[in-house]
């Protein structure tokens, strides 16, 4: 992109802005609306409108129809960037979908993507960061979920002068991309409150919350938001028992901790909220094993393939999950990366959109699950253990 230093006394800002605008057209004949042009070049819509009007008068831009514009200037080739990506791991579909989407988006933009696998390990995450620094990548995208390691990883990139995007777990100095955790919790909590009103006549005995302590305080806000959401719809829930259990974000650990809890709990109506779908499913399997599935209502986070498969089971007590749409992460991450590298304005946090997915709406949001061989929600197998921040 053209230089944008405001202190350069020889710089003609109107030409800089015009070159930014023309650079928004990435292929010959591409027709774009004003809103998309403004988003791509990072300029205010009012300024973009005036520039388009001027460039049209100068014969450099054509107005196509009522709301579309085409550039007569042949798009210049942007510099090929090298991005580093340290993936969370491959044990869960959520992280696999993020990785696959990012690889597709990078390929479509002609960007070289150097991929590493953190394997849910703090030590490996640090080694991978060192490797990406040695590779001299232009920008690093980090997907690791240990809050204590985040400052160490971030410092490595900062010392090398490499900008960074952190997925779902904040890293000092990095642009955050991912969940709006408190809002996602509120969505789930309000739905649980409505479910209790409809099915249990507004009565509940216990709220069971499955944590993931190693991920830190930000993901824990999902559970805080969930509690607030329940109480907004169901004020009487403020008097019931709230129990926190460490599920470590995995199916197996969550199954074991809820199984132990049920041995000493006689609660007849239990609301279960978990940090993610694997943890929520582990809790549900524990209730099923104990023959107490009718005593619970479970809500998850992510609307992962495992969760969506359970939502399709007849009479399931997995009543809903808040979607994060990991399959969309890739396009957004590449867009934010290019904005950072081209010195366009980027907010410190870029949040994904969340939607509530229920047994009644899962086919609306994910109609093609059957075509992608979605895994069935099988009964718990003690060999299926693992960790995921999602």
Image (tube, helix red, strand yellow):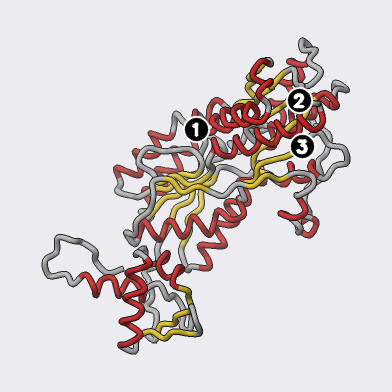
Question: Does label 1 or label 2 sit earlier along the sequence?
Answer: 2
Q: Marks 3 and 2: CB-CB under 8 Å?
A: no
- Name above or below for residue 354 compared with residue 6: above
How far, Cα to Cα, is label 3 from label 2? 16 Å
Nearer the camera: disc 1 or disc 3 = 3
Q: Position of residue 14 (x, y in %)?
A: 23, 73
- Name above or below for residue 338 compared with residue 195: below
Residue 204 occupies quadrant: top right
- Label 1: which residue? 218
Nearer the camera: disc 1 or disc 2 = 2
Q: Residue at x 39, y 46 (%)?
A: 348
Q: Which mark is residue 202?
A: 2
Q: Position of residue 90 (x, y in %)?
A: 63, 44
Q: Residue at x 30, y 74 (%)?
A: 19
Q: Residues within 10 Å of mark 1 (few under 14, many from 20)?
A: some
Location of the N terminus by quadrant is bottom left
Residue 383 visible: no
The answer to whether 220 appears left or right of 48 in the picture is right
Location of the C terminus by quadrant is top right
Q: Which mark is residue 227?
A: none
Residue 227 visible: yes
Q: Position of residue 84 (x, y in %)?
A: 44, 53
Q: Which mark is residue 319?
A: 3
- Name above or below for residue 265 compared with residue 88: above
Q: How many marks?
A: 3
How far, Cα to Cα, is label 1 from label 3? 24 Å
Q: Position of residue 50 (x, y in %)?
A: 32, 75
Residue 4 occupies quadrant: bottom left
As helix, strand or loop, the secondary structure at mark 3 comes to: strand
As helix, strand or loop, the secondary structure at mark 2 comes to: loop
């Amino acid at each position: 992109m053209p230089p944008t230093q405001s202190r350069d006394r020889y710089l003609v800002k109107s030409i800089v802005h015009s070159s930014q605008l023309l650079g928004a057209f990435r292929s010959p004949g591409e027709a774009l609306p004003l809103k998309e042009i403004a988003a791509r070049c990072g300029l205010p819509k009012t300024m973009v409108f005036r520039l388009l009007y001027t460039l049209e008068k100068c014969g450099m831009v054509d107005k196509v129809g009522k709301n579309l514009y085409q550039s007569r200037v042949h798009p210049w080739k942007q510099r090929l960037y090298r991005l580093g990506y340290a993936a969370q791991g491959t044990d869960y579909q959520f992280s696999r979908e993020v990785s696959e989407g990012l690889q597709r988006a990078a390929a479509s933009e002609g960007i070289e993507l150097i991929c590493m696998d953190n394997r849910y390990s703090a030590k490996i995450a640090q080694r991978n960061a060192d490797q990406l620094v040695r590779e001299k990548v232009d920008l690093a995208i980090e997907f690791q979920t240990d809050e204590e390691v985040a400052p160490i990883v971030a410092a490595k990139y900062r010392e090398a002068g490499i900008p960074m995007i952190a997925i779902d777990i904040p890293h000092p100095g990095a642009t955050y991309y991912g969940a709006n955790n408190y809002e996602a919790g509120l969505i789930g909590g309000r739905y649980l409150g409505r479910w209790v009103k409809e099915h249990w006549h507004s009565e509940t005995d216990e709220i069971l919350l499955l944590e993931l302590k190693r991920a830190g305080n930000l993901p824990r806000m999902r559970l805080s938001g969930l509690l607030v959401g329940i109480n907004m719809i169901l004020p009487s829930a403020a008097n019931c028992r709230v129990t926190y259990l460490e599920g470590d974000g995995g199916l197996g650990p969550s199954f074991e901790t809820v199984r132990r809890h049920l041995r000493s709990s006689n609660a007849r109506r239990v609301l279960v909220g978990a940090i993610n779908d694997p943890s929520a499913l582990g809790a549900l399997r524990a209730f099923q094993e104990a023959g107490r599935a009718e005593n619970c209502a479970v809500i998850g986070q992510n609307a992962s393939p495992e969760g969506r498969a359970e939502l399709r089971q007849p009479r399931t007590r997995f009543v809903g999950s808040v979607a994060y749409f990991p399959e969309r992460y890739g396009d957004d991450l590449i867009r934010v990366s290019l904005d950072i590298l081209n010195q366009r304005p980027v907010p410190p946090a870029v949040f994904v959109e969340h939607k509530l997915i229920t047994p009644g709406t899962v086919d609306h949001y994910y109609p093609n699950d059957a075509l992608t061989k979605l895994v069935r929600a099988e009964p718990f197998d003690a060999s299926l253990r693992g960790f995921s921040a999602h």
